Image: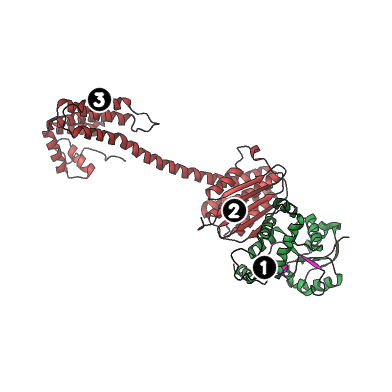
Chain colours: A green, B red
Amino acid sequence: MKPRIVLVDDHALFLAGVRAELGDAVEVVGTAGTVADAVPLIKEADPDVVLLDVHLPDGGGDAVINAVALERPAVRFLALSVSDAAEDVIAVIRAGARGYVTKTISGEELAQAIERVRSGDAVFSPRLAGFVLDAFRAGERVGGDSELDELTAREREVLQLIARGYMYKEIAARLHLSVKTVESHVSSVLRKLQLSSRHELTRWATRHRLV
Amino acid sequence: MALPRLALDGERRVVAGVCGGIARALGADVTLVRVVFAVLALGGGAGILVYLALWAYARARRAWFAVLLAVVASALVLSAVGLSGSGVLGLVLVAAGLWLALRRGGSLRPDTRVSYWGLALAAVGVAIAVPGGTPTLLAPGAIGAALVLLVGPWLWRLVLDRDAERSARVRSEERAEVAARVHDSVLQTLALIQRHAQEPQRVAALARRQERELRGWLYGDLPIGNGAASVVAALSAAAADVEEVHGVRVELATAGDCPVDERVEAAVLAAREAMTNAAKFAGVGEIDVYAEVTEDAVAVFVRDRGSGFDRAGVPPGRRGLVDSVERRLERAGGCATITSAPGEGTEVELRVPRDGSS
């Protein structure tokens, strides 16, 4: 069955472009251009996946997720954007988005990403992988009381390869792992990113805002 | 090391102005010079001969005549001091031999010709002088002097050559740097202009941009192609350039950031070249670039899933990969690793140490 999706983006041109690119790989059940429009629409349509712009005229993408998540826990979010500050992207991910891709992604790849998010996996674009590596940078840990505060060497390795543009299949071949294992590493990174309460994420975001 | 120039002093002259000329050339008191000549004249008339020799030299620049006179004069002085005839002859031969050797060869380096005649003459001189009943100190002294004269210029020349080699190396490195920059910018633009010769607007835009870049580099000391202050900004600018010029998509991911110093700039420029190469030769529409800044290094990965290539099959005239990427990184103290195989895409890994960490 085709995934049912909602597009949330304030650029009409982009909405039209994505619709055309995705073609009949998905079923678009609604579009919205603001947080205020998106929230009731998603609650009403109950789609499988929401493609969510990081920036909207009346708030960030994380505002949409926060407003919907409790009521519609099954709805999955995929953040989509042109070029954003790292902390904004991380904020959307921490709010609950299952991945982040850039708008330059091809229609085919976007369809794959939607499918992956729908089935509960994480989708890390190279850029997100870079942001996350930066946020969890080695040597900047202060407390370190929880395993959520650190990436394992393997997770780091996987993220680095994603950042370098390798696909899961290629990463699996290179690290002699199965694709499933690579996926589970990525999901585990996502979980750490969302659940970690480490100060460094805040500190890191603050530093980025200042830089 | 030019000798002070000797010119006759017409104003302070007593005979021909030689003493005055020497005094001026050496910056000494003219009376002192005259006294030296007077004392020398007592040694069998040697002072007079030296005076004549210098006069001849200053008038006509006949070096050989001056030297001949000087040699005769030294012989006179030595016999006046009380050397035996053969001793004097020996020393004269040593001097003449050394002069010949210096004039002809000037050095004993293996790759320059030595005057064997001169050396032979000197040897004969030593052979005559040593058993000739000369004072015991004189023969070893003469040999020592001969060695100093022979080896001295050689050592001197070695030092000069080493300096020359070093500056030649610096020059050639600078030339390589300029060549790499020109290759990355001007030659690429010219190639594009040829390809788009039918589109005047495009050509004009390309030319304008290139002009701006060159001006920035020549007069403003900006890194070519971007004036950005951080790695991420510089790479974004480079990626945007490559996207604009070649119509490909460059997906840039970064972790960390740092200011652009000379080494980092080398990595950025090399990355730009790698992107350009990928855009031109890989035959795919997308290039992935990842930059990772850690405490002690900056690493940039440029990857495409294109046609790939076999290193052995790249014609030697194609400078991009070697000069703009590998050599540039080497000069910056880093290294470039290129992984590619036909049909399997290409990944260029660039790594430079950060300042203060090497």
Task: Identify the residue under disc 3.
Answer: B124
Q: Which residues are magenta?
A: A72-94
Residue at far left of view: B42
Q: Is residue B92 above or below residue A81?
A: above
The amino acid sitting under disc 2 is: Val
Q: Do the dots labelled 2 and 3 sit on one chain?
A: yes
The local secondary structure at tag 1 comes to: helix
Between marks 2 and 3, how big is the CA–CA gap? 68 Å
Q: Where B39 falls versus B279 (above or below)?
A: above
Q: Is residue B62 visible?
A: no
Element at badge 2?
helix
* Residue under the point 38% across and 31% down: B112
| A110 or B109, nearer to the observer | B109
Subunit of label 1: A
Q: Quadrant of residue B44?
A: top left
Label 3 secondary element: helix
- Quarter of the image with the N terminus of chain B is top left
Residue that mark 1 sits on? A147
User: Looking at the picture, which amino acid does disc 3 mark?
Assistant: Val
- Sequence-wise, the earlier of marks 2 and 3 is 3
Looking at the image, is mark 1 or mark 3 nearer the viewer?
1
Letter of the chain that mark 2 sits on in the rendering: B
Q: Are marks 2 and 3 in contact (CB under 8 Å)?
A: no
How many numbered discs? 3
Q: Quadrant of residue B141?
A: top left
Q: CA distance from mark 1 to mark 2?
A: 36 Å
**Position of residue A142 in the picture relative to residue A158 (left or right):** left
Mark on residue B268? Answer: 2
Q: Is residue A129 above or below residue B138?
A: below
Name the one closer to the observer, B66 or A196.
A196
